[in-house]
Amino acid sequence: MPVVAAVAAIIAAVVAATGSIMSARAQSQAAKFQAKVAEQQAERERLAAETEADTFRRRHSRLLGTSRARRAGSNITGEGSPLLVDEQSAAEIELGFRTILSGGTARATRLEQEARLARFKGKAALTAGAFEAGSSLLGGLSKAFGAQTTAAGG
């Protein structure tokens, strides 16, 4: 009977170790998937910010051009106050453009950090799974050895 108990302990240890490894691999694959999704979202954020910034710049530059054309049609010169207004408007357009790009870059960077963290968690899951599997095997072998020792001594 002690041999049966020892074999059962070893089988249980192997099954537990296999389960730990499979679980760790699944967690690692899920983390890799999450990382890939975050990287794709980061790229989409960058592209969306570039598109939005370009649209902003074009729209406001057209408005500035329209304003200049109206002044020209009214025989108002492009000197003095109108020139200062145009320069200020152009500076604000550029600031808005840069602000939109910066926001997209910040969102993309956050997503890339999430991707790195997910990859780290995946690697940590594999390491933890290996230790858990080793612990299960050692525990099972200890039980099997204990059953054999008890049978030999008893």
Image (cartoon, grey):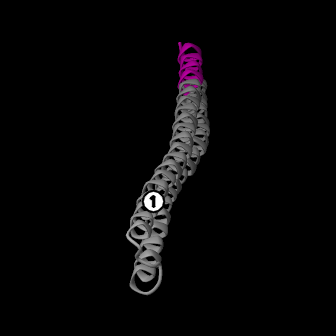
Q: Report the residue at 47% width, 71% height from top.
A: 90
Start-end of magenta stretch: 1-16
Any part of residue 121 in sight: no
Q: Which residue is mark 1?
A: 100
Out of 15 and 73, give the one closest to the viewer. Answer: 73
Please tell me how crowded label 1 is: few (under 14), some (14-19), or many (20+) other residues with Cα within 10 Å. Answer: some
Name the dominant secondary structure of the magenta segment: helix
Q: Nearer the viewer, residue 137 or 153?
A: 137
Where is residue 41 shown, x and y percent of the image? 50, 42
The x, y position of residue 17, in whole percent, is 58, 28
Q: Say which quarter of the image contains residue 85.
A: bottom left
Q: Specify the amino acid type for callout 1.
A: Ile
The secondary element bearing badge 1 is classed as helix
Name the residue nearer the viewer: 89 or 54.
89
Along the viewing direction, whichever of 125 and 133 lies nearer the viewer: 125
Q: Residue at x 40, y 76 (%)?
A: 76
Instruction: Farthest residue to the bottom: give it.
Output: 80
Judge whether residue 14 is colored magenta. yes
Left or right: residue 50 versus residue 88 is right
Q: Is residue 17 shown in magenta? A: no
Q: Is residue 51 above or below residue 91?
A: above
Quadrant of residue 62 within the rendered picture: bottom left
- Visible residue check, residue 69: yes
Does residue 96 lie above or below 117 as drawn?
below
Q: Is residue 100 above or below residue 141?
A: below
Is 55 placed above or below 151 here?
A: below
Q: Residue 71 at x, y = what percent? A: 40, 70
Could you tell me which residue is drawn at 53 percent across and 38 percent down? 31
